[in-house]
Amino acid sequence: MARRRERHPRRQRPRARVAGQSEGVTMAPGSLLTRPGQVQYGELLLGAGTPYRWRGITGWEELPALDSGTVPRSDAHGAIPGGLLAQARTIGLDGLVIRAPRASVGAVVATLNAGTVPVEDERPFVAWLDDRGPLLAYARATRRAVPAALGYRLGTITGGALEFVATDPRRYALAEQVASAMLPMSEPGLSWPLVWPLDFGAPGSTGAISTTNIGDAEAHPVIEFRGPVARPSLTNIGTGDALEYDIPLAADDVLIIDTSAGTVTLNGTASRIYTATSRSVPEQTFTLAPGTTNLHFRAAPGSSPAASATVRYRSAYW
């Protein structure tokens, strides 16, 4: 059976995937934040304690715009409910006020300009508004307004604004979660002759992985299968959805599945999406729902018990 063609790979993000860096950005997301009322975009810090104050943030706590598949009923009142798919999230920092000594206002504005230039890759956008702590998205600056009015030369600029667009509308916890398991392996049991206290040996591996998404949106994990193993698979016990690949992996091989981008790569470079078996669901449909998800790692008979599966994810929020 022909396998669907792979989409072009995208930058890894929180999605579980948010490894933390984009092109041109060297620090971890949110590493500059120290208090509520601050926003960090790439390496630019905005808000309390900086020269760049903002009066309000829009599009952050609101639901993003939704595309609805609902259609009117042809023979009755009302409509037939359809799927809801979120559009990109647009985030605005309104009422931007820039304050700096008269002699350095140009340098302060230049720093803002350099930090909000158009870029190809999205950068980490982290907002810390309240006691819930910071949340992470990936976005690009799409609008910047710095009015050159009467107060500009005096070091006080008012009425500015910034706009950012995040193609993934979900927001993520800063902390990446990692859960791993090895292939099932039986316990060694009792050794003879018996010696008190009884020693049943080290517990065997069960191949079980448990994840907890404490957010309210589904999260797309990154899954890594490490050899030596043949036909590795990961199954969601609750839904029955499985990812399975008919490929042998050597001891130093890693098969990486990015469920958000829909990519399957061997050692991070060569595409192996065509190795998906008939029982494997499309990668982008394999998600971690809010709450606890139990997964089972399995493989073809004869695979080494040293093989492992690792699931990386971040809790996701609307």
Image: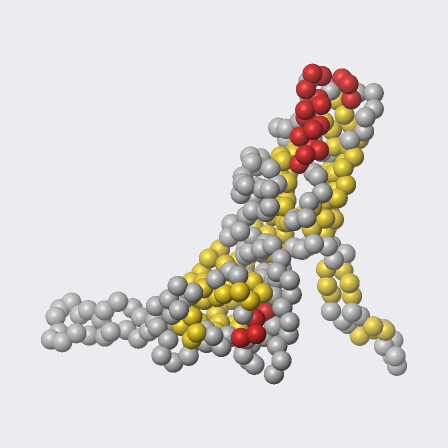
Residue depicted at x 68% and y 26%:
108
Q: Residue furthest front?
A: 270
Residue pictured at 54% horizontal, 57% vertical: 16
Q: Position of residue 276 (x, y in %)?
A: 55, 75
> Who is closer to the viewer here, 208 or 196?
208
For the question of whether residue 179 can be seen, the reply is yes
In the shown orientation, is residue 125 left or right of residue 98? left
- The quadrant holding residue 79 is bottom right
Q: 136 left or right of 66? A: left
Q: Residue at 68% x, 34% y: name it.
A: 114
Task: Tell me the quarter of the image containing the N terminus.
Answer: bottom right
* Rendering coords of residue 143 (x, y %): 77, 41
The outermost residue toward the bottom is: 1
Q: Residue drawn at (63%, 35%), measured in percent from left and top?
A: 44
Residue 195, percent across and down?
Answer: 12, 70
**Up-down relation of residue 159 to residue 237 (above or below):** above
Q: Please identify the quarter of the rendering in which residue 41 is found.
A: top right
Residue 33 is situated, as x and y percent measured from the top left of the image, at 57, 37
Left or right: residue 192 versus residue 300 is: left
Q: Which colour style is shown?
A: secondary structure
